[in-house]
Image (cartoon, helix red, strand yellow):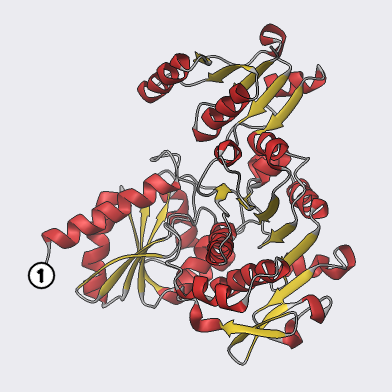
Amino acid sequence: MPNAYVIGLGKSGIASAKLLQREGWQVTVSDRGNSEELQQQRQLLLSAGIAVELGDSFNPEVAAPELVVVSPGVPWDVPGLVRARELGIDTIGEIELAWRYLQKQHWVCVTGTNGKTTTTALIAAIFQAAGFDAPAFGNIGYAACEVALADPQPDWAIAELSSYQIESSPGVAPRIGVWTTFTPDHLARHKTLENYYNIKAHLLRQSQHQVFNGDDPFLRQIGPSQWPNAGWTSVTGKAGLIGDPALGTYIEDGWVIAQGEAILPANTLRMPGSHNQQNLLLAVAAARLAKISKEAITQAIANFPGVPHRLEHICDWQGIEFINDSKATNYDAAEVGLASVESPAILIAGGEAKEGDDKGWLQVIHAKATAVLLIGNAAPTFAQRLKQVGYTQFEIVETMERAVISGAELAQKHQAKVVLLSPACASFDQYANFEQRGDHFRQLCKTFVAKHPTL
């Protein structure tokens, strides 16, 4: 029986181990952690005949596996993985493993710096409205190997893929590849913008059909010279299109036009912001490439509830709307989030800061935020940056609990319409992930409103 070694005991690692076991591999899962939750997962896997090593670093020369599968959060350049590749051991990501067992299915893969989750969710909703079994997975929804384990297997596989997942899954070749936006992110891992671009570009080159956001400055600059047969999108009408207009998708006179045909009114999607209109265009373009009807597209978009943690309406209190944008983990996403809400707004920002250009974000704060409440490790740095650009209406409150209470009080005082959590940061200083951060904000807002029906 061949030996496989899975690194990471999260959702992806567990699904990988179960898939490998089903396919006749002897499986060991390892994780450097040793928490109570991991101990519980270990017991479940042991009872299923899967070995688990906790608190260990991977040494390929000791483990001597024939296959290594890496969970998405594990850096591709840790010494054990570099050594495994040097030794010629087949070393792949969880997405690649799923691909090996789902190649007969049509894949739609969505990548980009921002906008991936909403676009992926829209595409899955459209395909499902058309009657397809089309689960969303990867960076959203299921782990990829959970989909590969499904019986029967789906009609379409709708994957949101981060640069980490693409980097470790070079064989994935989708029917349709979608690229939403491109701005500096994850440079601590990828080192240079060129490396980051090339990882994402690899996925699109592997795709049979490509769809690009033609309003993204970087992608527009790269343009049709590199991607001559792609479908480009634009919210600014046919005149704003680049590339072949016959392949384009755009908004004209309030309608979404795809490949020359009017599909649906653009305002059918109820999510705010021009970036969401762009996400809509990308989703419609993918759907039309799959020959999905206008009726199914319209039905799916009209019923689309939005995405948790991305400009998610939580509740209203005293005429003030609380909005969860926890998924805004970099400056660009947070700039888009703040630009999309009504002003004046109270902004809650901070967490674990990332590299990036904050100038656009700071300009939108000046224009739309009547006060900024700073939380987490980035609070002192953000306070310094706000001072440098002449913005003084900020306060370091440190915790989410204080931010929600102060946010409500300041919104009343300044007659602000919105209290917005849009952190411009990763969450790892205070939370396991952005979902946990957004869930905590949601819970605190609802508790506050329940306790303060009136002031």
The image shows residue 159, relative to residue 101, as above or below, that is: below
Residue type highlighted by circle 1 = Thr
Count of labels shown? 1
Q: Nearer the viewer, residue 324 or 106?
A: 106
Going by the picture, which residue comes out furthest to the top? 62
**Residue at (63, 56) in percent of width and height:** 113
**Residue at (19, 74) in percent of width and height:** 318
The image shows residue 293, relative to residue 394, as above or below, that is: below
Q: Position of residue 143 (x, y in %)?
A: 55, 40
Q: Nearer the viewer, residue 187 or 414?
A: 187
Q: Position of residue 265 (x, y in %)?
A: 55, 85
Residue 204 picture quarter: bottom right
Going by the picture, which residue comes out furthest to the bottom? 253
The residue identified by callout 1 is 454
Q: Quadrant of the N terminus?
A: top right
Q: Nearer the viewer, residue 7 or 126?
A: 126
**Residue at (56, 40) in percent of width and height:** 151
Q: Nearer the viewer, residue 224 or 259?
A: 259
Secondary structure beneath disc 1?
loop
Q: Quadrant of the C terminus?
A: bottom left
Within 10 Å of disc 1 (Cα), the crowding (few <14, some 14-19, many 20+) is: few
**From where the camera sits, is residue 250 visible?**
yes
Residue 279 picture quarter: bottom right
The image shows residue 358, relative to residue 3, as above or below, that is: below
- Please state if 291 lies on the left or on the right of 279 as rendered: right
Q: Position of residue 424 (x, y in %)?
A: 49, 56
**From where the camera sits, is residue 274 visible?**
no
Q: Position of residue 131 (x, y in %)?
A: 56, 63
